[in-house]
Every structure is written in C-alpha cells, then in structure tokens.
Amino acid sequence: MARAAFRSRPPLRRPKEGLPPDKEKGRGAKSNASGRYEKLAREAASDGWDLEEEAAPLKTEVTVESPRRIINYVDSPFVGFDRSINPIRGCEHGCIYCFARPTHAYYGLSPGLDFETKLFAKPSAAALLRRELSAKSYAMRHIAIGTNTDPYQPAERRYQIMRGLLEVLRDFRHPVSILTKSQLITRDLDILKEMARLGVVRTMLSVTTLDARLARAMEPRASTPKRRLEAIRTLADAGVPVGIMTAPMIPGINDEELEALLEAGKEAGAAFAGYTILRLPLEVAALFREWLEAVFPDRAGKVMRLIRDMNGGRDYDVNWSRASELRSVYAKLIAERFKIQARKLGLGAANSPLRHDLFRVPVEKTRQLSLF
C-alpha cells in the first residue's frame, strides 16, 4: 500500500527560525478536508510504512471559466464598498488565515489545499466589465479589487486579467481601489499613473510581518515583505496613491510588529494605512488551528485563547470581532496602538477620496464617420 498522503513531520519548535513543516512544500494549508457541503469526508490515515521519500509537489491547476457577469454586488455593513471584482477564484498565495477559503466549498472543493492549488481564472473579465459599465442602467460607484482573492497572484502573469480590467477602468475613468500582497502590481504602473493623474485609483499593499521566514510560513507564495515595501516605494515615487494594510493582526504571532510595520510603510512612501484583526470563519478555524499546532506548537494554546477572547469565547463571532465598538481588551489595545502610531507617522485613513465625477462611457472608434 502506498504511504499516506499527509504524513506528520517534526514541528518547528523555535518560532521564526527555519522554514515551516512542509507536508505540502510551498503551500499554506496542512490538509485538504472536504468542504462542508460534501456528503462524504476524506481523512488521511497512516498505513504503517514510514518511508522517507519525498512526495511529489502539488501543482497549481488553473481552469478557465466564463461567467455571465464580472461585478459582484456586496450588501454588508462590515465593508466600505458595495461592489467588487475577483479576477481569479482561489488564491495561490496560500495565506493560511484567508477568510475567502470557505468559498471553495460552494464548488465541491476543499477550503484547504484545493483553495490554493485549484484556481478558476476569468479571461473574459475585461470584456464583461466594458459591457456592464456601458449599460444605461449602470449606477457608478467605486469598485474594490483584491478584497477576496489577490488580483496579482502568480497566475496573473500568464492571463493578464487584471491589466485588462485596469485598461477598461481607465477608459471609463471609473474609480477603483486595489489591495494586493504582490509586487506584480508595479507591472501595470503605466496604467496606474494615468489613473492617478485623474484621481480615480487608490492602491494598498498588505504587509503582515517584516520577518521573511514568518511570511513564508503564513503566506508561502506571496511576495516577500521586502518586495511589497519596494512596491509601495515604486508606486509612491510614480505618484500613485498607495498605503499599507497591516492585516491581519494575529495575537501572539505578528501583533508585536504593528508599530514597526507602519513605520516601514511610511518610510517606503505609504500615505495612509489600515489594519484588521484575524477572522476565522467556517473551515478557516480548523485549518488555522492545524497550522498553529504544526508551526508554533509552544504557543498555539495561548494564541487561540486570545482569539477566542476577541470573539466572545468562540473561534469566530462576527458580532464581536467586527462590531462597531470593540468588546475585548486585546482588540481595544491593538486599535489604540494603531491609532497612536498612525497619528505619529502622519498616516491617514485607508479611505482617501476618489473622484466620481469623471465617469463616462468612451465613444467606440469605428471606420464609419459620424454624420453629426
């Protein structure tokens, strides 16, 4: 019998020293449990053969899909926008804490390794967006990109979906905000500079830690912290509004770096900043606990106690963690630290205004001249 697909390995006993255990090298999740809608559940089991050969690395599979619409309309009191675009479903960055992981369960896939290895790209996104923005019924409001999965994950190098979307948004002079963990955003600097001159674009780089090894453990295929700060500097030098998002803050893991992150962002050229505290909805809670036990076994219990304290005794409770008035002492402390440091550094809020008065449907260029 072949060996079990997911065999245990020695945990990293000293945090931030060395690389994380690699049941699946270069991936965030440590397992691939079935989604919550599946009738059958998969569970890895040892067959007794303690063989030492390396498992074949998981390869990323990208499936092209053809949606009927590309703008997602959002009705939530917890976000500052009412529409977004996700160029790719799933995310190869593999951030273990990603709150978007449970969406893969809707398609019969696992929020674990499937989420970061089985992706769905939308090459028709730009054409769909042009059609939707051209509709007489369209009511213009700012579009947020990067709020669910990263628009500049590795597959974007091949498909260039995001670049196509930006070309459309530029042509329509449509306001947009972009959040990413990838230096790849600087590839589109030419378009972003044009949009910046019009005042219709705002960008943010998410930087969760300055420790490359910790970043490698939490966000295995995202750009390194150094590259993200370099991207902030490149955007700022080009006149593109850019900020730093210190998200998520995880108690006992990276929250001690909050002030240093904001200082590094400011030094790189960030003009504004934001933060969020870790959320563990649905399957993310079990995946995160599993990761904690593997990578930080000495502090896993403490970290989860602090997380539960910020969620009313649960792994996740939206009425606690995202309430308008913070309830836990720890959450209030993080909020106060952020407020003090941001004020000290002169970093504004992550909602700098965008122009909404320039939107127009561009005139189609045709060979036939107009009679008027």
Image (spheres, rainbow, N blue to C red):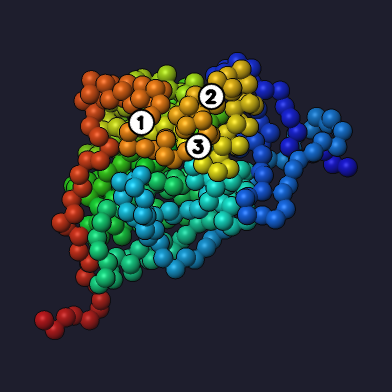
Residue 365: image quadrant is bottom left
Q: How far from the left and from the top, in percent, is residue 226?
A: 41, 27
Q: Is residue 200 above or below residue 285?
A: below
Q: Which residue in the structure is indicated by mark 3?
A: 316
Q: Looking at the image, tell me whether mark 1 or mark 3 is earlier in sequence order.
A: 3
Mark 1 surroundings: few (<14), some (14-19) or many (≥20) residues within 10 A: some
User: What distance separates the C-alpha of mark 1 from that of mark 3?
Assistant: 14 Å
Q: Residue at x 79, y 33 (%)?
A: 53
Q: Amino acid at mark 1?
A: Leu
- Tell me whether circle 3 and circle 2 mark residues in contact (CB < 8 Å): no
Q: Residue at x 26, y 70 (%)?
A: 137
Q: Amino acid at mark 2?
A: Arg
Q: How far from the left and from the top, in percent, is residue 371?
A: 13, 84
Q: Is residue 351 left or right of residue 67?
A: left
Mark 3 surroundings: few (<14), some (14-19) or many (≥20) residues within 10 A: many
Q: How far from the left and from the top, in percent, is residue 256?
A: 42, 19
User: What distance separates the C-alpha of mark 3 from that of mark 2?
Assistant: 12 Å
Q: Which residue in the structure is indicated by mark 1?
A: 326
Residue 244: image quadrant is top left
Q: Residue at x 48, y 53 (%)?
A: 88
User: What distance separates the C-alpha of mark 2 from that of mark 1?
Assistant: 17 Å
Q: How far from the left and from the top, in percent, is residue 119?
A: 55, 52
Which residue extends farthest bottom?
371
Label 1's element?
loop
- Across the whole image, how many numbered discs are drawn on residues? 3
- Tell me whether circle 1 and circle 3 mark residues in contact (CB < 8 Å): no
Q: Looking at the image, tell me whether mark 2 or mark 1 is earlier in sequence order.
A: 2
Q: Residue at x 27, y 29 (%)?
A: 269
Which quarter of the rendered picture does the C terminus lie within?
A: bottom left
Q: Amino acid at mark 3?
A: Tyr
Q: Is residue 354 left or right of residue 190?
A: left
Label disc, if present, on residue 305 of the rendered structure: 2
